[in-house]
Image: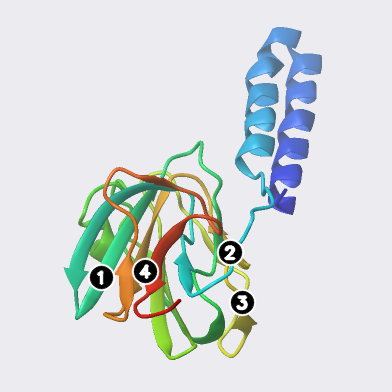
Amino acid sequence: MVADGIYYALGLTLGGFLIAYLTRPAYGIPLFILAVFCLYFFRDPERPIPVGPYAVSPADGKVLVVTAEDGGTRISIFLNVFDVHVNRSPVPGTITSVKYQPGKFLVASREEASKENEMNTVAVEGEGSKVVFKQITGLIARRIVFWKKVGDVVNRGERVGMIKFGSRMDVWLGPEWEIAVQVGQRVSAGSSILAKKKGAT
């Protein structure tokens, strides 16, 4: 579990007890429910990481878009509030760029969110390939967390950050990748294969 979930849950639980003590016990119940939800939301399960020439999903959620873009392929994944929100690196390599962009808080499932919302764009280069992924906020999500920095070396499926509450993740893969997912498919961060290197065995 991400430590933030424990802090939020403790704060809400203490607030619930305080309200229950000062008013009526039943009035503290909504805060107790929110505390339990925070523990659920900030879960961080272990995942089996595929071994091989693969790009894995950097986020849990539903594939909204698979489209040709800038000479490669963009895959967009929508995370609802019930998905795990810990993000992982899709490929092994070195982080060569991290760029934060302020923006709007449109509903993350809308296509405009890929360009207009607040986001954090990360590039990972390794094994002759460059993969770019974007942590994108949504209507409810208001905070992007990224735990790495430029120059860090990451493994495939390694935890790199999270987006708090409903959000979107875009991944750009170059022409050297053979896409293995389709629109409507559910994916899991670190374990679902998005693509395989062409010509790899």
Q: CA distance from mark 2 to mark 3?
A: 8 Å
Q: Viewer-proximal residue, 90 or 11?
A: 90
Residues at marks 4 and 3, CA–CA distance in whole angstroms: 19 Å
Does 186 sit left or right of 183 as displayed? Answer: right
Whether the residues at callouts 2 and 3 have beta carbons within 8 Å, the answer is yes
Image mark for residue 102: 4
Mark 2 / mark 1, whichever is N-terminal: 1
Type of the residue with mark 1: Thr
- Please tell me whether mark 4 or mark 3 is closer to you in this view: 3
Question: Decide: marks 1, 4 in contact (CB < 8 A)?
Answer: no
Q: Residue at x 72, y 48 (%)?
A: 1
Say which element carries label 3: loop
Disc 2 target residue: 161
Query: As rendered, which of 196 and 122 lies closer to the eye?
Result: 196
Give the alpha-carbon distance from disc 1 to disc 4, as whole Å: 24 Å
For label 1, the residue is 73
As measured in the structure, the alpha-carbon distance from the residue carrying label 2 to the one carrying label 1 is 23 Å
Residue pointed to by mark 3: 148
Element at badge 4?
Answer: loop
Q: Height in image: 134 above or below 40? A: below
Residue 170 lies, with reference to residue 92, above or below; the image says above
- Looking at marks 2 and 3 on the same chain, the residue that comes earlier in the sequence is marked by 3
Q: Position of residue 116 (x, y in %)?
A: 25, 63
Q: CA distance from mark 2 to mark 4?
A: 17 Å
Q: Secondary structure at mark 1?
A: strand
**Residue 140 place in picture, x, y as percent:** 42, 44
* Residue 6 percent across, percent down from the top left: 76, 44
37 horizontally vs 166: left or right: right
Badge 2: how crowded within 10 Å, few (<14), some, or many (20+)?
some
